[in-house]
Amino acid sequence: MRKWLTRFAPAPTGYLHLGHVLNAVRVWEEARSHGGRVLLRIEDHDRERCRPEYETALLDDLDWLGFVPDLYPTNTFRDGRCESRQSDRGDIYSTLAERLRGQELLYGCACSRKEIVESRSPGVLGSGGPYPGTCRDLGLPLTNDVAWRVRLPSTSVTFVDRWCGPQTQVPAEQCGDLLIRDRRGNWTYQFVATVDDHLQGITDVIRGEDLLASTGRQILLGQLLGRPTPATFAHHALIMKSPTQKLSKSDHDTGVRDLRAAGWTREQVLTAAETGRHRQSSMT
Ligand SMILES: [Zn+2]
């Protein structure tokens, strides 16, 4: 039997809010019910948006909430360099990118966001369409001032989400060739999450359903990176701010920090996260 391992992987781009708490509840409860373990990973790959003070705050909030990681407990991050913090894993990402380059799967892309939007077929509005592959065969060198993309095969990916059921996704049609590094030198979420889930041996991913659409591309990229068997995925419903808006870190009425300051107990915060009932009582 494989060892059951999941992860809690917040990005320190703001304070922990009830949406993260709900995810933590699901992650720890699934780990306990499967006799598995929880790994803590700090996803601070976006160097412009992440702040050390947010990391400190989220470690403190996790301790206060009583979520104890089995791998990389909070103090391993407080002690300084930690191999489960993405900004300390740059060499690993470079090595894996180099492996993709060696397989001739990686190419440089000089398109601006505006050019990508404009090059889409007429009638395709917004930023939701796939990258059209403009730079695929230009042979641009992989320097620091171009974005790096992985050539994706046009295959479909099928998987069974434990909570959302059978899924079929065609990443080449959803997003086109996958961006793994942006023009400012930031590794992308899709790349680092896939690399880390693979190399850290994550067997089960439990996360919000806003990431369901990213799963096929992560499974496909994992294959290209040499992962023999994909993780099992389970996506849960999100706490919504309104029927169409998810919670964000700027919603102070749902921030763990603010709720603590307003005198909420740990139990009240956990209950609010699980029931999604936070609006009426928190705005005082
Ligand atoms: Zn391009």
Image (cartoon, helix red, strand yellow):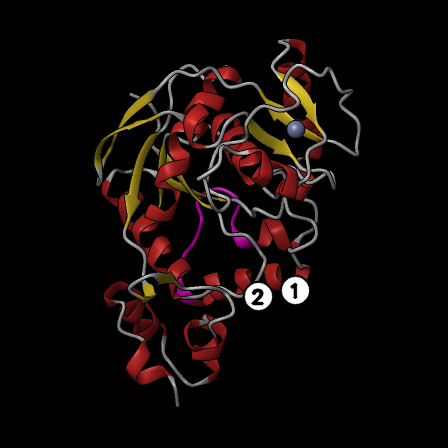
User: What segment is highlighted magenta in the picture?
Assistant: 65-74
Q: Which residue is disc 1 drawn over?
A: 53
The location of residue 75, given as percent across then percent down, is 58, 54
Whether residue 108 sits left or right of residue 232 in the image: it is right
Q: The C terminus lies in which quarter of the figure?
A: bottom left
Q: Which residue is disc 2 drawn over?
A: 57
The location of residue 232, given as percent across then percent down, is 32, 30
The location of residue 117, given as percent across then percent down, is 57, 40
Q: Residue 143, located in which quarter of the rendered image?
A: top right
Q: Are marks 1 and 2 in contact (CB under 8 Å)?
A: yes
Using the image, determine if residue 46 lies above or below residue 118. below
Q: The N terminus lies in which quarter of the figure?
A: top left
Residue lying at 72% horizontally and 31% vertically, measured from the top left:
110
What's the CA distance linking mark 1 and mark 2? Answer: 6 Å
Whether residue 16 sits left or right of residue 53 in the image: it is left
Using the image, determine if residue 125 lies above or below residue 17. above
**Secondary structure under badge 2?**
helix
Residue lying at 51% horizontally and 50% vertically, measured from the top left:
73
Q: On the rendering, which quadrant does ligand 1 occupy? A: top right
Total label count?
Answer: 2
